[in-house]
Amino acid sequence: MNINFNKINKDKVMGDLSAFIDKLISERDSLSEIVRNYNKDEHIEKLIEENTKLRIHSLHTLSVKEREQAREFSNKHWESCKGNTRYILEGTGIGTAVGVQCTKCGVKKDITDTSNW
Ligand SMILES: [Zn+2]
């Protein structure tokens, strides 16, 4: 490798390096500031608040099992009849029953995961 380290090249490389180092220092300072001001408890409290809000405003949160079954049903009916999937939620005294229905052929399936009840 033949690098021409003449004066102009050297000045340019040193200038770039210096700018790069300045940028790193300023990034370090701003990250230090973030770490200094970070409040774990406040962050956790905000997340809990957000989670509660999401839970209150959603009709139902599918369990992993329900989601997998719904996806399987949805894929199957999209392939066989190009039908979309309608979700049927039924509030019972002990939990929410979840059903899926194909909008084309009308087939219904109960996918309720009662392990959450
Ligand atoms: Zn169908």
Image (tube, rainbow, N blue to C red):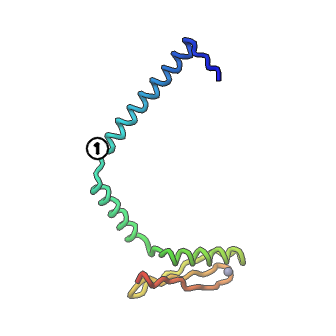
Look at 53% across and 74% down and name the residue there: 67
Give the crowd class for mark 1: few <14, some 14-19, many >=20 residues within 10 Å: few
State the image coordinates of residue 47 (x, y, percent, origin top left).
35, 60
Residue occupying the far right of the picture: 80
Which of these two is toward me, 91 or 76? 76
Up/down of 5 relative to 36, above or below = above
Look at 50% across and 74% down and name the residue there: 64
Up/down of 1 relative to 105, above or below = above
Which of these two is toward me, 25 or 10? 10
Q: Is mark 1 within 8 Å of ligand 1?
A: no
Residue occupying the far bottom of the picture: 93
Residue occupying the far front of the picture: 1
Q: Quadrant of residue 25?
A: top left
Q: Quadrant of residue 36?
A: top left
Give the residue type at disc 1: Arg
Ligand 1 is found in the corner quadrant, namely: bottom right
Which of these two is toward me, 1 or 35? 1
Quadrant of the image containing the C terminus: bottom left
Look at 45% across and 85% down and name the residue there: 114
State the image coordinates of residue 33 (x, y, percent, origin top left).
31, 40
Look at 65% across and 74% down and name the residue there: 75
Which of these two is toward me, 83 or 73? 73
Q: Which residue is mark 1?
A: 36
